[in-house]
Image (tube, grey):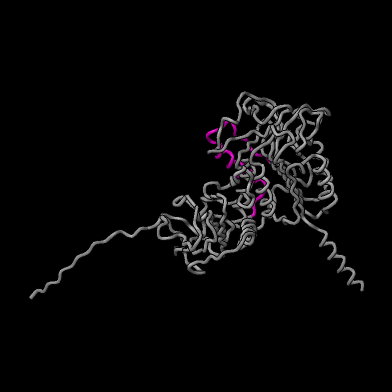
Amino acid sequence: MKKLLIILLLLSLQVQAEDKALIIGITEYQQKKYNLKGIDLDVSMANKISQILNFKPENTKTLTGNLANKANIEQTINEWLINGVSENDRVFIYFSGHGGHFKDKNGDETDGFDEYITTYDLGEKKSDGGYILDDELSTWIQSIPSQYKIIMLDSCHSGTATRGITPSGQQMGENLLYSKKHSFGQSTQINIMSKSQSTESNSGFLDGLNNTITLAAAHDFEAAQASDKGSLFTIGVYKALSTAAQQGTQPTALGIVESAGTYIATALENDPDYIHKPLLFGDKKLAQLPLGTKPSRNSQGPNWQEWAKIATSGMPFESSINQAEFNEGELITFTTNIPTQGYLNIVNIDAHDVATILYPNQFNPENQINAGTLEVPGSLMPFEIEAVKPTGKSLTVFVVTTNPLNLYKQSLNVRDGEGQFIENFAGVDEHSYRSMKIRAKQEKPDIYTSSIKSTVK
């Protein structure tokens, strides 16, 4: 009986022990003038980041919209994390929204400023509230009993100098940049930080916390940049972690931050005044340990899981493929019975969890179709689909919508006619052709022949 009780006790402890994640995205503010575009995309990417870091979706809470007010954030941290995890559980906290600073009152900041992140209920004045000071956040995080806490902050953390340049005039491709720097009483169209004018040392938002590593988007004197495709730091971290998971490698937090910095510098190479350098603070031992990423192989990755759900979410229709297994270089053909006039998108998720738009594509950019049997690629379509590495299982999902939806043209920035983010399509990349490759159709040349028979005696 004693042995049985010990076994039951161990089982009970194992059930209670759960890694937990909290994702906070200020997708809208009570005062609309503070709204940032692309935060909804940040939230989607952060959920995938948490899955790659091996946090289960059922153990992840997400606060957006009016739920991301200060009181609810504090209550959630208390109930979900401080009182909801043990020292053996890992914790991941993500925040995306405006950040700012004002003069330090208690003398604990080396740069003379208190940093803060904003919440949904951000007011016009400091006395109106709607923000979380770094001192408050630090106290909350220290109260979480976990011995392994990962904090990711995609916001501006403070600033000591400005100059008259506004991000609204600069672009990343076709996407306007938006500073995530907040100053009380001002909207998002404000001056960005001037790196060249600051001589202050970085104070280190949440620096020095034991058992904690903080991935921060920008120095004190820099403004983190967002766009309608999402915030650059979050995109950079997501890309770096996705690549590591797809390759089966185990990166450190330092390596991920360096990769994100490279992404930001590349994305803003034509706008150098807006480049901001991500930082890593906290426990050096944790920073040098592998992050424990979950390999995204053979149906285990977040893209596969998400698209498998999409495949069963609508009214079913029949689709088929010309063969079940392919050797590298063989051509692939799909046949599908389109149920209604509408718009067709075909997405493939390969064995390494890379999502690729097969149709429409650069050779066939329009995707409006009629009801009936359709072959892709058909005889009149100017492209072919070739089987390429990586080897292993792949999932191909066919989506027909009656409203216009063209994933090739929209890619990461997938929104409906009212501008609302369509969450399910956030991770698709029309440029990453992997287990299936789109190429221009290899036309056979026309050949004309003639022959004459004769005899030589």
The vertical placement of 13 against 271, above or below, is below
Which quarter shows the C terminus?
bottom left
Q: Which image quadrant is residue 273 in?
A: top right
Task: Give 77 or 345, whichever is nearer the viewer.
Answer: 345
Q: What segment carries the magenta color?
A: 250-279
Q: Which image quadrant is residue 12 in?
A: bottom right
Which quarter shows the N terminus?
bottom right
The vertical placement of 361 against 12, above or below, is above
- Is 185 magenta? The answer is no
Task: Give 260 or 188, whichever is nearer the viewer.
Answer: 188
Q: Main secondary structure of the magenta part?
A: helix
The reply, left or right, for residue 333 in relation to residue 192 is left
Count of all numbered marks drawn on residues in the image: 0
Task: Give 213 or 376, whichever is nearer the viewer.
Answer: 376
Q: Is residue 151 visible?
A: no
In the rendering, at what x and y percent does residue 113 appear? 76, 29
Q: Residue furthest right?
A: 1
Q: Residue furthest left?
A: 457
Q: Residue furthest bottom?
A: 457
Q: Is residue 339 visible?
A: yes
At 47% from the left and 63% from the top, the residue drawn is 333
